[in-house]
Image: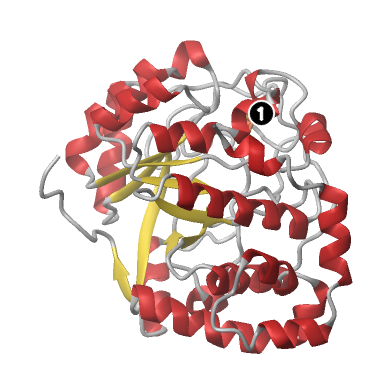
Amino acid sequence: MSFKTTFEQYDWDTLEKEIYAVTTAEVAQILQKEKIGLEDFKALISPAAKPFLEQMAQRSNQLTKKRFGNTMQMYIPMYLSNECQNICTYCGFSMTNKIPRKTLTDAEILKEVSKIKSLGYDHILLVTGEANKTVGVSYIKHAIELIKNNFSNISMEVQPLDQEEYETLVAAGLYAVLVYQETYHEATYKVHHPKGKKSNFQYRLDTPDRLGKAGIHKIGIGALFGLEDWRVDSFYTALHLRYLQKTYWKTKYSISFPRLRPFEGDVAPKVEMTDSDLVQLICAYRLLDEDVELSMSTRESEKFRDHIIHLGITSISAESKTNPGGYSVEPQSLEQFEISDERSTAEIKAMIQSQGYEVVFKDWDKAYS
Ligand code: SF4
């Protein structure tokens, strides 16, 4: 059993028509409801919901404060490798891009860890390209074991793996896995992932299922906005979330909102997602689900991140480097994509605190394993 069965019950074009046919009267009626369902979510991400943005933002703020308090979780990514055997049209690490490739050694990983710890971080996100020979399961397991005494929470964003491989990594100390579908439009997915293991749409779609079965603590999902219509992709993400929550109910979930960013080679977004669209989407997710963590990266601008803090986001990164060794070893090497908010951790912390939020670097200790 997997999400495939649920996914196949929906048709992209029909969903698109339904979302764009919603009227403002329907949105107004839905916003009277106490409980927002998946069908209602369609209306909240529709163009018809734009006049209700302020109302949605206020409700999102209240729900987030009720569930998460005045807190903002901080995390930082650490890129371990830029080697990759896939072609993804939108990524600086894509196999055909002629860039120097690098995979961090133990000594380099520890040097990066030392710099990251000096910034105060306790939650780390390990990132690699998809290169089985160099950064396969044994490399990742070794990296987790090498750094686990330095962090109380280790997440990763690497190639999709088999269930047994996830079980091995969970046993080694892995807490969460982020795996974005990029787009739920299968034909468009094929266009942007023409070669390599990632070209297998179905294997990627089933990855959160394998993670749920492996007993991971948290799964992060999402779509890369710009490849397809963000509204339809977001409906599928919400559908995926609901399916996972029902099927793997012991697991926590998070959603991220990456928009296409410039990189070496560049791909122009097919469908633009404006700042106002992104605010609408964040609020719609919060109205749909009080518990889901909503995460914001440094892809977004200073101004946008400053304004989004109180609208539903629960975790945020700062001072991110998207190149292996970027914090201490090779600060000048090519990044996966250009970050937009380049402020220091201290500056982001001060910005969050100035808005009345407590900055959380560490939120719990393991009482048992
Ligand atoms: S998105 Fe990931 S899999 Fe695709 S080229 Fe970049 S690093 Fe490789």
Front residue of 222/235: it is 235
Work out which quarter of the rendered image holds the C terminus and state it: top left
For label 1, being within 8 Å of ligand 1 is answered: no
| Left or right: 56 as drawn, with respect to 112 | right
Above-or-below relation of 298 to 154:
below
Work out which quarter of the rendered image holds the N terminus and state it: top right
Q: Name the residue under label 1.
A: 202
Coordinates of residue 51 in the picture (x, y in percent): 77, 87
Q: In the displayed image of the protein, which residue is found farthest to the left?
A: 367
Front residue of 229/346: it is 229
Residue at left 29%, top 53%? 121
| Left or right: 23 as drawn, with respect to 348 | right
| Left or right: 355 as drawn, with respect to 52 | left
Q: Quadrant of ligand 1?
A: top right
Residue 61 seen from this side? yes
| Left or right: 300 as drawn, with respect to 220 | right
Residue at left 29%, top 22%? 142
Coordinates of residue 302 in the picture (x, y in percent): 57, 69
Coordinates of residue 318 in the picture (x, y in percent): 44, 58
Q: How dense is the environment of label 1, judged by Cα within 10 Å: few (below 14), some, or many (20 and up)?
A: few
Residue at left 68%, top 82%? 30
Q: In the displayed image of the protein, which residue is found farthest to the top?
A: 133
Residue 320 seen from this side? no
Secondary structure under badge 1?
helix
Q: Which quarter of the figure has residue 143?
A: top left
Coordinates of residue 77 in the picture (x, y in percent): 43, 45
Residue at left 27%, top 24%? 107
- Residue type highlighted by circle 1: Gln
Q: Which quarter of the figure has residue 206?
A: top right
Total marks drawn?
A: 1
